Image: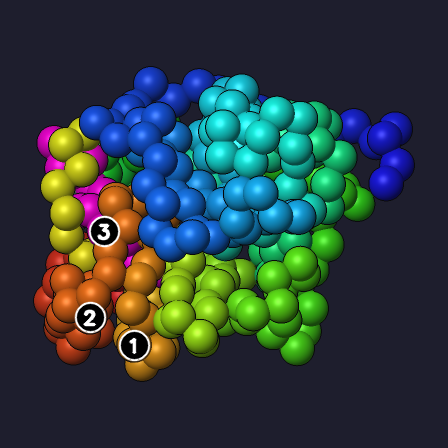
Amino acid sequence: MSEDQEMTYGEDYGYIPATSVRSGVGVEVSADLYCHAVQIVNIAFVGQPGRDGYVLVDAGMPRSADAIIEAAEERFGANTRPSAILLTHGHFDHVGAIIELIEHWRVPVYAHELELPYLTGRKSYPEPDPSVEGGMVAKLSGFFPNEPIDLGHHVQPLPEDGTVPFLPDFRWIATPGHTEGHVSFFREKDRALIAGDAFVAVRQEYLYKVVTQQFEISGPPRYFTPDWTQAKASVERLAALRPQLAITGHGRPAGGEELAAGLKRLADDFDKMAKPEYGKYIEV
């Protein structure tokens, strides 16, 4: 991999002073699935300590690289590095430390082909919507970064056949709506799901609920979701998989009946539970 290309964040990127009671906390969801909270967002490690190879899913908040590297080394050992970084999507809280991690680890990054324009400096995401129905986080979302980052040739598209590099038991599933190229990762043998922001486990629009991490299976963050028709179809697609455990982009991991009942309810009542009553991305 060439090291001479400069990678850049959008000009609006910077430290976001938001955190939660789970920040810095790691949860072993299964022997080879580990969820780690970085301020208000989750990253996931896939791989078993003591065995060769692991993969990082998503790259946290801006200025969080040191915390992510520390979490990786606590889990897998000093001076270890992942085989790759997989991205569910490219919003600022999922790629906030990606450049520093690439520079430190020198590993490839994979994302859906439709997400690449936002990761190679060609296209900005739709602006966040502070007018959307919701609480204080929604109101403050106008300050969140939406400009593209540029990873150049360090990012490449996921294979078209649905396979996942370095994770032969997983497949990626297109789950657009929150972003155009959003994906989730699913493993059939134990019905494990890494859902990104296709659905989350906390009402991400409300500051108190984000800070306290009050559990609730919820739709994608309203202030950053421009296509509610696709978002609904994506939740229905994931519910049909009947996952038994899930790591979402926000909120604690979920499993068993708690996950099954919550995801079914969300899919059945998506328009009432998830879709906001008003906002600039709601059809008039």
Where does the image place residue 224, in percent across and percent down from the top left?
Answer: 35, 47
Q: What kind of residue is marked 1?
A: Arg
Q: Which is in the foreground here, disc 3 or disc 2?
A: 2
- Counting residues from the start of the chain, the first of labels 2 and 1 encountered is 1
- Which residue is rendered at x = 35% and y = 78% of the image? 241
Residue at 39%, 65% in the rendered image: 192
Q: Residues within 10 Å of mark 3 (few under 14, many from 20)?
A: many
In the rendered view, tell whether residue 101 sits above or below residue 51.
above
Q: Say which mark, if any, is on residue 201.
A: 3
Nearer to us in this view, 247 or 40 = 247
What distance separates the C-alpha of mark 2 from that of mark 1? 7 Å
Q: Is residue 199 left or right of residue 209?
A: right
**Does the CB distance between marks 3 and 2 fall below 8 Å?**
no
Q: Quadrant of the C terminus?
A: bottom left
* Viewer-proximal residue among 216 and 136: 216
Left or right of 204? Residue 154 is right
Q: Is residue 202 magenta?
A: yes
Mark before the other along the chain sequence, 3 or 1: 3
Report whether residue 136 is seen. no
Specify the segment rendered in magenta.
Answer: 197-210
Q: CA distance from mark 3 to mark 2?
A: 12 Å
Extreme bottom residue here? 240
